[in-house]
Image (cartoon, rainbow, N blue to C red):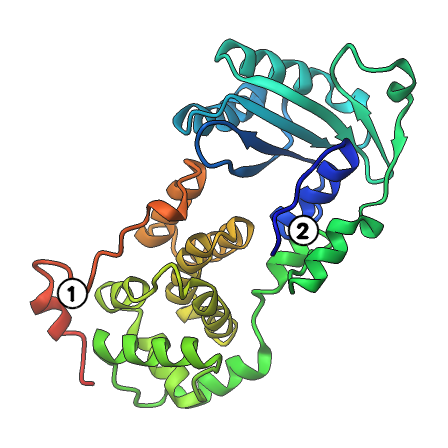
Amino acid sequence: MAKLTARCPDDLLAFVPVALGFVPEQSIAMLTFGPGPGFHARVDLPTDPADTDLVVEALVEPCLRHDVDRVVLVLYADGPGAVREVADRLESGFAREGIVVFEMMCADGQRWFPMQSGRPPDLYDGVPYDVSIHPFAAEAVVAGLVTHASRGDLAATLAPDPAAVAGVKAALGDIVPAQGSWVRRLTRRHARDGTVPDTADLARLLVSITDPVVREAAWCAISRAESRSHAVLWTAVLRAAPPGLVVGPAAVLAFACWLAGHGALAWCAVDRALTADCDCSLAETVSGLLVAAVSPAQWQPPGWPPPGCEEAHAAGGAA
């Protein structure tokens, strides 16, 4: 997608849903600027005033880690009165760390309101906006990017496909788990070709990656250049997974989405994985990468098998 340059509040409001992949609700969206590569983040608005400092800290910490010196904050709420205290705490929290809040506004879906002093008086009554007719929305469509109406709608793209799940259940039978080498060959081929494994291979893949060592073979096979195609593949695999086989594909998908720069979808996949297994180490790792706003550009593929894992790898099952 072509680079989008925001020159006014309407541009910022149109950019956020494109960047996140959905229209935020009851959220704080942050865009960052500084010497290093910028990033964007979204957190839920605190529902308890006692949690406001934690929310401020969650936004400030990655900015300090990445030498951010300016931010734009958009508070998605029912109106400016509902978030006045949060806005004040955000501005003071960033100011303490020497980070300039270049712009902060509240958006209620129809009007935006400045949340800082010194703006023209007429703006405080609210300014109408409509991101659906903004040129950024049109550019996103041309680029093939889908902007969902809410985070819930985005998460729903990972919901089980009943027909695919039923097919996998019927195929499980006497499935023999495969080694990591088989998993790597299968997933690389289908990611490259833009195809989905047949039901028998899906069943074998899902059973195989219940083994954390074989699962590691799957995510270690994903390069940054191929991450988008792997994210598409693992979405299909996750949607075909019966309840007891969800954690593996959800965790690998979370990693692929993070590597592809799809942070919001990565969070949805992390949620699916940790709901299935709260101790899933790969999901916890991806969660940490997202919280710290680690850039996918920093990723160095570890190779496979990792040192010391040759014996475990060989025990992963027949090819």
* Residue at image location 18% in from the left, 74% down from the top: 316
- Horizontally, is 136 left or right of 33 in the view? right
Q: Amino acid at mark 2?
A: Phe
Q: Quadrant of residue 180?
A: bottom left
Instruction: Name the spot of residue 157 as percent of width and height, x first.
Output: 61, 65
Residue name at image x 75 percent, y 19 percent: 115
Disc 2: which residue: 22
Circle 2 crowding by C-alpha within 10 Å: few under 14, some 14–19, many from 20: many
Earlier sequence position, callout 1 versus callout 2: 2
- Left or right of 4 in this view: 135: right
Element type at marker 1?
A: loop
**Residue 141 vs residue 288, the one in the foreground:** 141
**Rendered position, 318 above or below 83:** below
Q: Position of residue 142 (x, y in %)?
A: 70, 63
Q: Residue at x 34, y 47 (%)?
A: 285
Which residue is depicted at the point 33% across and 50% down? 279
Q: Which residue is mark 1?
A: 305
Q: Quadrant of the C terminus?
A: bottom left
Q: Quadrant of the N terminus?
A: bottom right
Q: Position of residue 87 (x, y in %)?
A: 68, 19
Helix, strand or loop for disc 2: loop
Work out whether 208 lies above or below 266: below
Which residue type does callout 1 highlight? Pro
259 lies left or right of 94: left
